[in-house]
Image: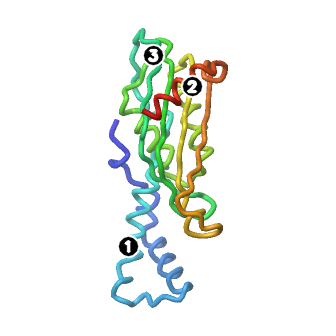
């Protein structure tokens, strides 16, 4: 399966003219001169950006893991520091950070790059961080049927840093645990200690 960078939101492409019109209208409504040189191409640029940053709508995240492999490895597998970028559905402001995924296989594994693609498929749409964390954990749990899953997502939200309470540098951390991670403090502790290395 191709990476998310190969996908574009086709709905944006089909509605390009309307989106550009509305971006132009928003610029007027906030007091800008849409005929100013620096803004002439802005509606087109914003539309092209939307094709990319909302590409997740073109992909069913459950399909991203693709082929799984039978493998008798039943020890912890972690992919950490998966960088993501998303858009807050409340303010349409960016948020970004890192996702960390761990799972205990039960005879089935996924290609490691597929975990990063799963993060992209879930985050490249209007989202909230809590849902991202839950969706990743649920998809892994449903698809791989592992002994356990743990997902930790860190995020910096511009809707909190650049507006409202204006607290730049603050991070939000969310987690989701399934299976043995839920019942074993030692397993959760091992996962978290490996994230710090």
Task: Decide: is 179 above or below 21.
Answer: above
Q: Which residue in the protein does label 1 denote?
A: 44
Disc 3 secondary structure class? strand
Q: Nearer the viewer, mark 2 or mark 3?
A: 2
Image location of residue 159, percent across then percent down = 58, 64
Image location of residue 180, percent across then percent down = 61, 18
Q: Which mark is residue 108?
A: 3
N-term mark: 3 or 1: 1
**Do labels 2 and 1 touch, CB within 8 Å?**
no
Q: CA distance from mark 3 to mark 1?
A: 45 Å
Tag count: 3
Image location of residue 70, percent across then percent down = 40, 13
Furthest toward the top, the residue is 72
The residue at 38%/65% (across/down) is: 48
Q: CA distance from mark 2 to mark 3?
A: 23 Å
N-term mark: 2 or 1: 1
Q: Residues within 10 Å of mark 3 (few under 14, many from 20)?
A: some
Q: Residue 111 falls in which quadrant of the image?
A: top left
């Amino acid at each position: 399966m191709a990476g998310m960078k190969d996908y574009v939101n086709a709905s944006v492409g089909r509605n390009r003219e309307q989106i550009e019109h509305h971006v132009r209208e928003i610029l007027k409504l906030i007091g800008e001169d849409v005929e100013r040189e620096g803004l002439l191409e802005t509606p087109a640029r914003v539309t092209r950006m939307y094709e990319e940053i909302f590409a997740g709508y073109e992909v069913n995240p459950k399909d991203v893991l693709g082929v799984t492999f039978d493998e008798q490895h039943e020890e912890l597998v972690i992919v950490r520091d998966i960088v993501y970028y998303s858009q807050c559905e409340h303010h349409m402001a960016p948020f970004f950070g890192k996702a960390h995924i761990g799972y205990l296989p039960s005879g089935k594994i996924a290609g490691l790059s597929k975990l990063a693609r799963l993060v992209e498929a879930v985050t490249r749409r209007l989202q909230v961080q809590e849902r991202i964390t839950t969706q990743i954990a649920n998809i892994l749990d449903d698809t791989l049927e592992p002994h356990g899953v743990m997902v930790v997502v860190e995020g910096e939200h511009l809707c909190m840093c650049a507006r409202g309470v204006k607290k730049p540098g603050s991070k939000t951390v969310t987690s989701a645990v399934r299976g043995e991670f839920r019942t074993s403090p030692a397993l959760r502790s091992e996962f978290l200690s490996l994230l710090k290395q």
